[in-house]
Amino acid sequence: MINRKHFIRLHRESPSHAGIIVCTYDPDFVGQAAIVAQPDLAGQLLRVSHLS
């Protein structure tokens, strides 16, 4: 869990940001990569979890 909690707290305290994506640790970095098909992430917090 490197520093994802810090970014979640940042989102709560200051919701006017360009967008934040947080994820759980997974040594398979290629498999964990996510393509976000949203035109505007401003103010959003996206969570990606390891599901294997």
Image (cartoon, rainbow, N blue to C red):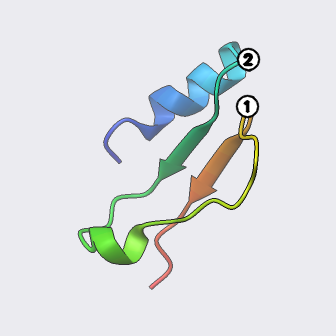
- Residue 4: percent from left, percent from top: 45, 39
Q: Residue furthest front?
A: 39
From the viewer's perspective, is 10 left or right of 41?
A: left
Neighbour class for label 2 at 10 Å: few (<14), some, many (≥20)? Answer: few
Q: Quadrant of the C terminus?
A: bottom left
- Residue 29: percent from left, percent from top: 29, 67
Q: Which residue is mark 1?
A: 42
Real-space CA distance between mark 1 and mark 2, rounded to the nearest whole angstrom: 7 Å
Quarter of the rendering containing residue 37: bottom right
- Identify the residue at horizontal 71%, vertical 40% (top origin): 41
Q: Which residue is mark 2?
A: 16
Query: Residue 32 got which mark?
Result: none
- Residue 1: percent from left, percent from top: 35, 48
From the viewer's perspective, is 5 left or right of 43?
A: left
- Identify the residue at horizontal 27%, vertical 74% (top origin): 28
- Identify the residue at horizontal 50%, vertical 79% (top origin): 51
* Residue 34 higher or lower than 11, as above or below: below
* Residue 9 higher or lower than 46, as above or below: above
From the viewer's perspective, is 24 left or right of 37?
A: left
**Label 1 sits on what residue type?**
Ala
* Residue 17 higher or lower than 19, as above or below: above
